[in-house]
Amino acid sequence: VISYRETESLVLANYNAVLNKVISDYGITETKIIDLIKSISNDSKEKLFWYIQKPLKLEFFISILIYLKYGSEYVVKPNYKADDKGIPYQHAPGNIGDINITSKSVNWLVEVTLIRNKTQQYNAETADCIRHLKQADKPLKYLSFVAPIVHPDTEEFYHNAIINMIINDEDNCFMKTYNIDGFVDITQCKHNLQDMRTYKDDIVTKMRKKFG
């Protein structure tokens, strides 16, 4: 047990140390990172990290916000490629998710996009995200999909994915779509996992009323 705890603590420190270094080097606070996230979604100019492309910048900023709220409890591992100072320069490879937040029992996947086009969002940010979720090796699996605007077709896809998982007795999977502001708000409150559980419970309740 002692050996496992030491190994787990080392992993937590190694991954989280990269984000912690960026926060320390640039004096980033929770208020500042939220302002930075809003500067992307509002298309306003922000001098800090101006050289990072916007889609990658959003992954970076969301990772920092999650670390600020959950870093003492979870391993926060963005999958973009970063330099030795923790600054990202390339998106995550296509075969893995954008950001993984893990503990001994939880794998929480956050998929982030700036795609606004309905067709592109549906084609690029749906089936692959579910596949990434199912590949997770933890007892409890969560997926948050975050975009400036979540189109109804995309939202319906995730809604139906939950129903399919319920039918197939995959009771350990939870997911929900969020616009950027909604995700920031729920993260500030640290209610992310509970919000996804509540969303699924509401679907189950409606199904029981319909077919019970």
Image (cartoon, helix red, strand yellow):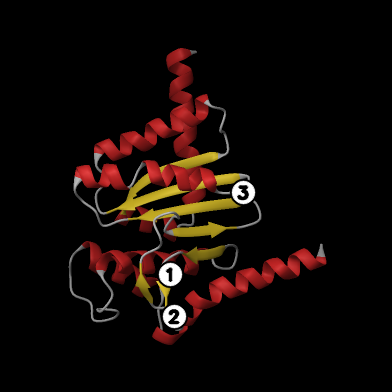
Q: Which residue is mark 3?
A: 138
Residues at discs 3 and 2 in contact (Cβ within 8 Å) = no
The x and y percentages for residue 50 are 25, 78
Looking at the image, residue 103 sits to the left or right of residue 128; the answer is: right
The x and y percentages for residue 137 are 60, 49
Q: Earlier in the sequence, mark 3 or mark 2?
A: 2
Q: Amino acid at mark 1?
A: Ile
* Element carrying mark 2: helix
> Residue at 58% across / 38% down in the picture?
172
* Element carrying mark 3: loop
Closer to us: 4 or 39 = 4
Q: Amino acid at mark 2?
A: Val
Dot 1 alpha-carbon crowd within 10 angstroms: few under 14, some 14 to 19, many 20 or more: many
Q: Which residue is mark 1?
A: 64
Quarter containing the N terminus: bottom right
- Between disc 3 and disc 2, the foreground one is 3
Counting the numbered discs, the total is 3
Marks 1/2: CA–CA distance: 9 Å
Q: Which residue is mark 2?
A: 22
Closer to us: 91 or 15 = 91
Q: Amino acid at mark 3?
A: Lys
Q: Earlier in the sequence, mark 1 or mark 2?
A: 2
Marks 1/3: CA–CA distance: 23 Å
Residues at discs 1 and 2 in contact (Cβ within 8 Å) = yes
> Residue at 53% across / 27% down in the picture?
168
> Residue at 45% across / 21% down in the picture?
207
The x and y percentages for residue 57 are 31, 69
Q: Earlier in the sequence, mark 1 or mark 3?
A: 1
- Which image quarter: residue 59? bottom left
Looking at the image, residue 197 sits to the left or right of residue 116; the answer is: right
